[in-house]
Every structure is written in structure tokens, then in C-alpha cells.
Amino acid sequence: MNSTYANGTVHRYEEIKFVPPSNNHKTEVQSKDVTILPNKNVSARLYLSKISRKNKKFPLFFYIHGGGFCIESTFSSGYDSYLHKLTAQANVLVVSINYRLAPVHPIPAYYDDSWDVMNWDARGKEPWLKQHANFSRVFLAGDSAGANIANNIMVRASEESHFVLSLVGMALLDPYFGNGKPDVLWTYLCPKTNGIDDPRFNLAAHPKILSKLKCSKIFVFTAGKDNLRDRTWTYYETMKKIGWKGELGIKETEGEGHVFHM
């Protein structure tokens, strides 16, 4: 995906097609971009479902894109198309987080950026959020590396008593987690941690952390041909084993590969 040269230059091989925000006349979903941390170039794209009455409130749905922490964007055509459809079908207000990318910005930049976006949203000053977000029904979701970030944000929110958003549930799509085996990408992105059992990566090695998750629903998704399939099942089986009190579910789609929904 990237090449990093001795002088620090990073070359990204995969070109991402960016698209502007738009109003979908068929679904009546609106979207717009907001800059949250200008000095860090952290932003988000908001998607608002069809408004049937002036002050209608929608569940607040945070989505975090994947791409191995190194590529992709919330502004890419694939994620934009997907989230327009998701917003319409789920009838929610989506905040799609655009975080800084590795290797220019190493771990923990992606976690910190996503956390900052959520806290910015919690202040409720943005007009769409102020008028249409139901802050008592908040959900987190992400795919691949984005699912890893979502889970870590849920961990952090569960540990901080002053966090004001009411996190109801989480959806982890083909999550990029560790399972105690060597992982070249994680080692490259995060060389200064305690390795492949870092609690941000291999959650199964830290069941006490998982047991404290305060949301009431967690659903994980994987695919039969996904190279991360076994890791997803390890996460799910660990949650079952520790007796997590919330509603836990898993779905595996046969014959499909990693992040096939995109």
C-alpha cells in the first residue's frame, strides 16, 4: 500500500477517488463536510436521513473507515456511496470520521483523532447535531482497521466516567484484531508497544478490558474467505467466555472476502 524511504518520504500506491458531499434526491439523504481539528487536518462527513418533521431526532451513528490505518478516506467514492445507503436504510444521523493516516502519523494518532471527533460532536454545537441528533442513542461501527479503532474508542469511553454520550451498541465489520500470532503490519505501525499482545490490538489477551465495555449490544461480522476470519471468531469467543452481560451476536457470510460489503 505504501513505501517509506530513508529520507522519510512516503509513497502511496493506491489512488483514492474523492467525491464531494451531496444530496441524494432518491433517498433524500443529505451530506456535508465539517472540519473539526484544522491544525491536524481531522474532519468528518455527516449524513442526515430524510427529515419528516422540523425537529426530528435520529440515533447518532459514528462510522470509522478501514484501510489498514494507511489508506482510504471518509471522502472516497466507495465509503460515500455505502454510507448514503446505510443512512437511508437505518434512518440515522451518521458521522463518518476522517482521521490521519499511517505511517506519517503513527499509532495512537487514529485513536486520538476519533476520540476528539466524538467529544467534539458531544458538545452538540454543529447545527445538524444540535437539531437532529439523539445523544441518548449513540452507536459505533467500523470495518477492518476502523473496527479496531471503534472498539478502542468503546474501551476508552467505558473507562472515562465523564464521557457524556450514551453508547448503546457497536458493530465490528471484519475487524483487524490480533490473535497472538506475528503481524507484520501492526509491528510496522506500532514498533514501540509491547508487541502483538498490545491491548489495542489483541483484545483476547486482555479479557478484563473487554469485560468493562459499557454498551449493551455488540455485533461482529466476518466472511468465509476473509483472512481475518479466525481473529474475529477469537474476539467473539472471548466475549462469550468472559460472560459479557450485553447482547452479543456474530454473522459469517460464506463465499465472500474481506470487507466485501464495500
Image (spheres, rainbow, N blue to C red):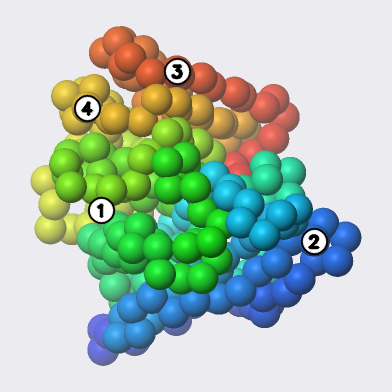
Q: Is residue 239 visible?
A: yes
Pointer 3 residue: 247
Give the residue at x 74% y 44%. Answer: 89
Q: CA distance from mark 1 to mark 4?
A: 27 Å
Closer to the camera in the image, 172 or 72: 172
Residue type at tag 4 = Lys
Q: Tell me the amino acid under the disc marked 1.
A: Thr
Residue in the picture at 26% in, 13% down: 242
Please tell me whether mark 1 sits on a helix, a strand or a loop.
helix
Q: Is residue 182 left or right of residue 173?
A: left
What separation in Å lies between label 3 and label 1 (alpha carbons)? Answer: 33 Å
Residue 212, label in figure: 4
Label 3 Cα crowd, 10 Å radius (few <14 / some 14-19 / many 20+): few
Image x and y of residue 56, in percent: 63, 52
- Assess disc 2: are there few (<14), some (14-19) or many (≥20) residues with their C-alpha within 10 Å of its C-alpha: some
Image depth: mark 2 or mark 1 in front: 2
Instruction: Give the residue pinned by disc 1.
Output: 187
| Vertical position of residue 162 compared to residue 71: above or below | above
Secondary structure of residue under mark 2? loop
Residue underneath mark 2: 28
What residue appears at the point 69 percent right and 35 percent down from the top-left corner? 256
Q: Quadrant of residue 110?
A: bottom left
In percent of width and height, residue 28 lies at: 80, 61
For marks 4 and 2, give the CA distance.
Answer: 39 Å
Of the two numbered discs 2 and 1 on the same chain, state the one appearing first in sequence.
2
- Foreground: disc 4 or disc 2: 2
